[in-house]
């Protein structure tokens, strides 16, 4: 870290979607509604969740360790891996 | 007296009904277990009741599964103790990995509150021992996320192992469109774990225990089964 008096705070964005193969009745309903509003050509609508959080990692944490921590957060709580897929993105914020 | 513990999470709302239902049986002693307790005490059976624990935030049961009491409930289950999850309790058990699969939003996207007919597919569990295979139970459902799903490989094993305990059927006991209130895979209403000591069901047996109030007492058979399974054997 170049500025020891500033703590690095990371912006984390987690995207959670129903697993493919799991029926998504909400997505199906929205998909049916869009043509009624004049929007053609839309398919495979899936509705999921978006979670934002800020993470202040340990001072000596590597990128791999931070990613692993967020991955574990997702697997344990933020998503249910039986029925959901997730991806996340991490932005540095100084 | 068979000792039951009914766990209370923030947002549980069927805990009092569960306790009351069990109290109508003269041979059951019931106490509440607070979600922050770290021990289940000397109970012989545990009930995770219905409701909206933690407001159903994130996913139903996703947060309740990390309550301090759940460590003790898990150990109790792993030691062979009887655990019944009703509705939100069923959701908590799947989130905790004590039962396979998951409960999704009802395919109709609406909260459903009505009577259903259940067929007892397996009467050889500690939760259905007072029934016979093929018995019909008329019990209420009241849920928005009761759509049970599980991957095909696990489902095959569950079927072979008799883990599908209750299915939605029509009043004649037949599988039928319209009998399933939530779109659950293969009309599944209740499942147990491999060992048969942990059972989850979406319908509410605690609301069908006093015939004069509820118009039927079929739900009582679930509790009767558990009490009978746990009573000390009567000497011959």
Image (tube, rainbow, N blue to C red):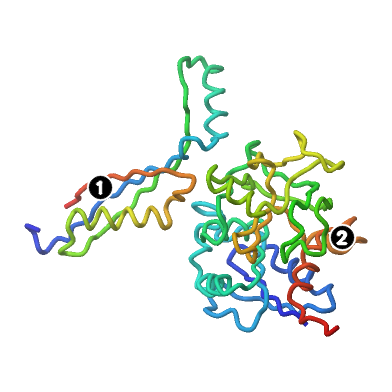
Identified at 79% across, 73% down, the residue is: B228
Quadrant for the C terminus of chain B in the image:
bottom right
Residue B7: percent from left, percent from top: 63, 71
Identified at 67% across, 72% down, the residue is: B6
Front-lying residue, B187 or B59: B187
B49 left or right of B210 in image: left
Residue A39: percent from left, percent from top: 48, 16
Image quadrant where residue B215 sits: bottom right
B124 left or right of A45 in image: right
Identified at 82% across, 53% down, the residue is: B137
Q: Under tag 2, what secondary structure?
A: loop
In the rendered image, the residue lying farthest to the front is: B236
Residue B130: percent from left, percent from top: 82, 64
In the rendered image, the residue lying farthest to the left is: A2
Front-lying residue, A4 or B92: B92
Quadrant for the N terminus of chain B in the image:
bottom right
How far, Cα to Cα, is label 2 from label 1?
A: 55 Å
State whether residue A31 is above or below residue B48: above
Using the image, name the chain to which the residue with label 2 belongs: B
Image quadrant where residue B105 sits: top right
Identified at 69% across, 67% down, the residue is: B15
Q: Under tag 1, what secondary structure?
A: strand
State whether residue B164 is above or below residue B65: above
State whether residue A51 is above or below residue B70: above
Q: Badge 2: few (under 14), some or many (20 or more) residues near its Cα, within 10 Å?
A: some
- Which mark is on residue B217? 2
Residue B45: percent from left, percent from top: 67, 74
Q: Badge 1: few (under 14), some or many (20 or more) residues near its Cα, within 10 Å?
A: some
The residue that mark 1 highlights is A90
């Amino acid at each position: 870290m170049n500025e020891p008096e500033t703590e690095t705070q990371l912006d984390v964005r987690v995207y959670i979607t129903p697993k493919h193969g799991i029926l998504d009745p909400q997505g199906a309903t929205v998909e049916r509604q869009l043509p009624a509003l004049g929007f053609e050509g839309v398919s495979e609508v899936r509705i999921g969740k978006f979670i934002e959080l800020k993470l202040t990692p340990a001072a000596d944490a590597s990128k791999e360790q931070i990613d692993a921590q967020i991955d574990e957060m997702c697997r344990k709580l933020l998503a249910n891996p039986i029925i959901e897929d997730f991806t996340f993105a991490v932005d540095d914020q100084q | 007296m068979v000792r039951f513990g009914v766990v209370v999470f923030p947002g549980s709302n069927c805990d009092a009904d569960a306790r009351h239902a069990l109290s109508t049986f003269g041979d059951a002693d019931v106490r509440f277990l607070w979600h922050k307790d770290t021990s289940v005490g000397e109970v012989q059976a545990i009930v995770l009741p219905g409701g909206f624990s933690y407001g159903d935030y994130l996913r139903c049961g996703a947060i309740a599964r990390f309550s301090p009491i759940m460590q003790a409930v898990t150990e109790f289950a792993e030691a062979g103790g009887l655990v019944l999850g009703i509705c939100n309790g069923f959701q908590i058990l799947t989130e905790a990995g004590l039962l396979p699969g998951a409960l999704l939003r009802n395919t109709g996207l609406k909260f459903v509150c009505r009577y259903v007919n259940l067929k007892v597919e397996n009467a050889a569990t500690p939760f259905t021992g007072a029934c016979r295979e093929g018995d019909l139970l008329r019990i209420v459902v009241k849920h928005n996320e009761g759509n049970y799903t599980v991957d095909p490989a696990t489902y095959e094993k569950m079927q072979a192992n008799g883990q599908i305990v209750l299915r939605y059927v029509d009043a004649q006991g037949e599988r039928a469109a319209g009998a399933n209130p939530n779109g659950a895979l293969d009309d599944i209403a209740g499942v147990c774990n491999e060992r048969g000591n942990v059972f989850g069901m979406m319908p509410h047996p605690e609301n069908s225990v006093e015939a004069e109030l509820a118009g039927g007492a079929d739900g009582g058979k679930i509790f009767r089964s558990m009490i009978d399974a746990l009573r000390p054997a009567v000497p011959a």
